[in-house]
Image (cartoon, helix red, strand yellow):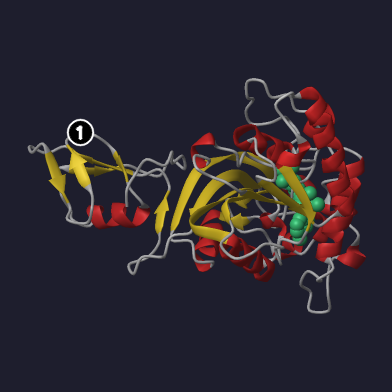
Amino acid sequence: MNPNPHASNQDDRLNQDGGPSSDYLSTVEEVYAEAAQTPAPALCCTTGPSWKLPGLSVPRAMLERNYGCGTTVHPRDLAGAERVLYVGVGAGMEALQFSYFLRRPESVVAIDKVPAMLHKAEELLAEAARENTWFDPSFVSLRKGDALSLPLEDGSVDIAAQNCLFNIFEQDHLDQALGEVHRVLKPHGKLITSDPVARTAIPKELADDARLRAQCLSGALPLEDYLGALVRAGFGTVEVRARRPYRMLDRRRYGVTTDILLDSIEVAAIKDPIPDDGPCIFTGRTAIYIGEDEFIDDGKGHLLHRDVPLGVCDKTAQALQSLGRDDLVLTESTWHYPGDGCC
Ligand SMILES: C[S@@+](CC[C@H](N)C(=O)[O-])C[C@H]1O[C@@H](n2cnc3c(N)ncnc32)[C@H](O)[C@@H]1O
């Protein structure tokens, strides 16, 4: 990949209104058809899996085609999960990692729109079976499909995951993709995503560059907008689990007025109804009661034991802060929410 926006093909970038042409989707297909054949070291993160598992060997060619930016595989999400949907399988590394925990035929349904990528995933999952005695390729059902129109029944999966695909979509397509995932999840099912987000909004001329978008560099939304899209799709609980520096869109190479830092985030969105007073968005804030009593109860389901931090969503943190009590401390967002709070 050449990260220089000026090296992109102008012809497939803009439509007559100056926005990205619907052709950006075909540019995406071209980029990933190519990246299936030849590893693209600068495309997304090819530095290795975020973590390793005992007894799991990831074929080298699969690792070289790791085009994700964080991890979506967490054992804690998988207790009781029967079926995981993986959208945009790439070369299959995360489908393999999900299989490590599920180990049943067709327990991971993995879709991709690009035939060359599906073929590569099939080939590399067969190679994984040769390297891992516990793995059988039947654990992963590979299907051609589009994130914008998922080939699955309503309410049919416990977990849905996507890594570094949804950031590529323009807003209408993002809403459509999130709506589709929401549709196929069971009630209380979880969408686990990892994507780049931008510390400051990406200028239109970069956002409109189809090739940079396909390379997961210029479609990144500010975190707040990304979380807003999840809520718009109907997810009532959202957990920001990780946020770490990912790439820099620097002035010299990208022609922007100020350098723009992209973060890679990991987020879980739960298909709970959105409460009347708004969604519960956890960003790693805690409430700590430091008063005289053993505990206090805010009457809204939060029991605060003296000196013990309680993970709270941002809405609750604001409500507690507005009480103005000097025996209540509200800590700032850490962007690392391990999933043990209550809202
Ligand atoms: C950035 S790569 C990420 C691949 C994989 N998740 C990983 O972490 O390595 C995006 C993947 O989505 C696939 N893709 C692109 N457009 C798609 C669409 N509309 N629906 C489903 N998959 C799509 C690409 O072929 C590619 O495999």
Q: Position of residue 238 (x, y in %)?
A: 46, 54
State whether residue 300 is above or below residue 296: below
Q: Is residue 277 left or right of residue 93?
A: left
Give the amino acid at mark 1.
Answer: Asp
Would you place residue 173 above or below residue 323 in this image? below
Q: Which residue lies most toward the front here?
A: 105
Relative vertical location of residue 116 with respect to residue 56 in this rendering, above or below: below
Query: Which residue, given by chain and number where applicable, does mark 1 sit on?
Result: 307
Please tell me whether mark 1 sits on a helix, a strand or a loop: loop
Disc 1 packing (10 Å; few <14; some 14–19; many ≥20): some
In this rendering, position of residue 297 left or right of residue 259: left
Residue, far left: 292
Query: Residue shown at 59%/65% (left/top)?
Result: 154
Do we see residue 225 in this rendering? no
Residue at the outermost bottom position: 16
Is residue 230 found left or right of 302 in the rendered image?
right
Give residue 283's position: percent from left, percent from top. 43, 47
Residue 109: image location, x then y, percent:
70, 50
Q: Nearer the viewer, residue 20 or 306?
A: 306
- Tell me how many marks there are: 1
Residue at the spot 50% in from the left edge and 42% down from the top edge? 80
x%, y% of residue 54? 63, 20
Mark 1: C-beta under 8 Å from nearest atom of ligand 1:
no
> Foreground: 84 or 24?
84
The quadrant of the image that shows the N terminus is top right
Q: Residue furthest top?
A: 54
Residue placed at 76% from the left, 72% from the top? 19
Image quadrant of residue 100?
top right
Confirm whether residue 155 shows in the render: yes
